[in-house]
Amino acid sequence: MSSNSFTRQESQYPGDRTAPKASLRLEWVYGYRAANCRSNIHLTENGELVYFSAAVAIVQSISSRDRCQQRFFLGHDDDIISSCLHPNKNIIATGQIGKRAQICVWNSQGIIKLESLLQGHTDGVGAINFSLDGERLASVGIDCENTIKIWHWGRGKLLATAVGHSQRVFDICFYGDHVITCGIQHIRFWTVLGNTLQFEEGQFGKSEAQTLMCIGHFLSSDTKQSTESTDNDYLCLTGAINGDFYIWKKYKIYKLIHGAHNSAIYSIDMIPDGFLTSSKDGLIKEWTKDFSPTRQPIRIPCLINLIEEVSVCSVASRNGYCVAGTRGGTLLLLYQ
């Protein structure tokens, strides 16, 4: 090869070759982050769908009139891997990966704007959840200690922190003033004590300890969540990797439903009359408050071919709309 093969050639096009005075603007995002994520799609009070891809959070209308409109939150500097919806159904929290992982709390209405920036996790923020009053935010990291943090997000203040578990923690959830976490063969019920947290280990009893993927919750008496749970009379449900439901009360298994799904339960979405679940088996099921199925399951089809199995990692329902997210990165509007 001759030595002048890499000699820079002068352009044959005359004129000014300086960079143009222009900027790029994001118009549309094709894609949905499903890898290593669960329960990461949300429907706002305004009937908009919120999800994320790479470092971008997307707010997309699902009404037939405005379905081709997207708006974006661009406040992250690395990939988003977790999200949750505020009780007012308009504010969103998103957590990212990275050595200096941050949580952004932002308003999805109108002109999207950052409300709070929370920093303190390392490696990434695996799961987040707002308290019922909307003032606090619980987060769990994906660091080696699965660190739990409780924030007053409006003031940007860290209230408490503790080591979550030596094994991976997959979900975190407020229950009144308490916090529940679950993960690989464990569930823990936490109480905030000053600037730290103290836990009670959930007891599987005679049942083999299962890996728990997601948490749903309501009270045993009337299913209306209270901000007071001083008697620790928890009633929450967890979806297990083997497809079973575990219902918990006072740190022990209150009820066990075998074979709720044929494979791992990835997502629980609480609705007024019960809850929805999505699973690795490709099904979405609707349940009553008494944990009974209400209708035939919805099987999510594969849009690529008829052979590939579909895994549903997230489901969200509001105001007659239901949206499912699959492990293959597809979002489906199921009914309205």
Image: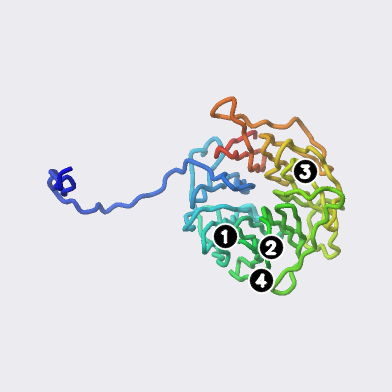
Which residue extends farthest bottom? 194
For marks 1 and 4, the one nearer the N-term is 1
Return the residue at label 3: 274
Q: Residue at x 17, y 45 (%)?
A: 5
Q: 10 Å neighbourhood of mark 1: few (<14), some, or many (≥20)?
A: many
Label 4 is placed on what type of residue?
Answer: Leu
Return the residue at label 2: 164
| Local secondary structure at mark 1 | strand
How far apart are labels 4 and 3 at the CA level? 32 Å
**Residue 306 picture quarter:** top right
The x and y percentages for residue 261 are 74, 37
Q: Nearer the viewer, mark 4 or mark 3?
A: 4
- Nearer-the-camera pick, 306 or 300: 306
The x and y percentages for residue 174 are 72, 59
Q: Nearer the viewer, mark 3 or mark 2?
A: 2
Q: Nearer the viewer, mark 1 or mark 2?
A: 2
| Local secondary structure at mark 2 | loop
Q: 10 Å neighbourhood of mark 2: few (<14), some, or many (≥20)?
A: many
Return the residue at label 4: 159
**Rendered position, 142 above or below 306:** below
How far apart are labels 1 and 2 at the CA level? 22 Å
- Nearer-the-camera pick, 224 or 128: 128
